[in-house]
Image (tube, rainbow, N blue to C red):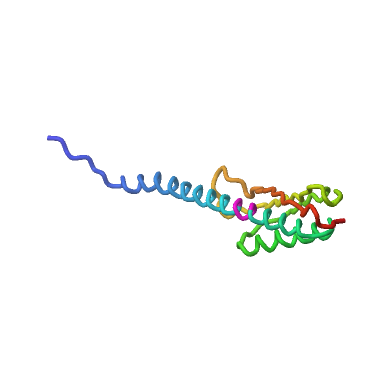
Amino acid sequence: MTRPRDERGSAAIEAAVGVPAFVLFVGLIVFGGRTATTHQAVETASADAARAASLERTSAAARASATSAAATSLANQDIQCLDVDVTVDTTQFARAVGETARVSVTVRCRLDLADLSVPGVPGSRLIAATTASPIDTWRERG
């Protein structure tokens, strides 16, 4: 007669293998969600900044307005960036009235991912978006 196998301790072994894999899986889901949410917010901030810059009459005012609009947009969406860089291309403000022109804004956000501590996930990630907005063709600009 054969004795049935003793299965004591098998649940502990299964947990030792399964729990870390599950935690890693959840960490990757959080990483993907946070990255996607931040990317969408940065695209929105870039569009808001480009629109705000295109409404100004001078390139200096456009830069200031774009920077302010991008910061406000990210704050309104509750996005916490390690640093935010707003680059405004206002070279087409020099075009004569009657010529088509546009202003382009790039917003870069360094997303903090250090709290995830998932193997293979960097401590931060740079997320960037660029948007262009037309400047009124018949509006005076300087």
Q: In the displayed image of the protein, which residue is found farthest to the top?
A: 1
Q: Could you say where residue 118 lies in the image, as x and y percent from the top left?
A: 54, 48
Q: Could you say where residue 97 lies in the image, as x and y percent from the top left?
A: 84, 52
**Magenta run includes residue 20:** no
Q: Which residue shows up at 50% across the image and 50% down it?
A: 27
Image: magenta residue range: 39-43
Labels in figure, total = 0
Q: Looking at the picture, tell me which residue is in the foreground, 120 or 1.
A: 120
Q: Looking at the picture, tell me which residue is in the foreground, 102 or 126.
A: 102
Q: Which residue shows up at 41% across the image and 49% down it?
A: 19
> From this viewpoint, is residue 114 visible?
no
- Whether residue 77 sits left or right of residue 107 in the image: it is left
Q: Could you say where residue 87 lies in the image, as x and y percent from the top left?
A: 77, 51
Q: Which residue shows up at 58% across the image and 45% down it?
A: 121
Name the main secondary structure of what is drawn in magenta.
Answer: helix
Q: Could you say where residue 120 lies in the image, as x and y percent from the top left?
A: 57, 42
The image quarter containing residue 44 is bottom right
Image quadrant in which the C terminus is located: bottom right
- Whether residue 28 sits left or right of residue 48 in the image: it is left
Q: Looking at the picture, tell me which residue is in the foreground, 9 or 43.
A: 43
- Whether residue 138 sits left or right of residue 70 in the image: it is right
Image quadrant in which the N terminus is located: top left
> From this viewpoint, is residue 71 visible?
yes
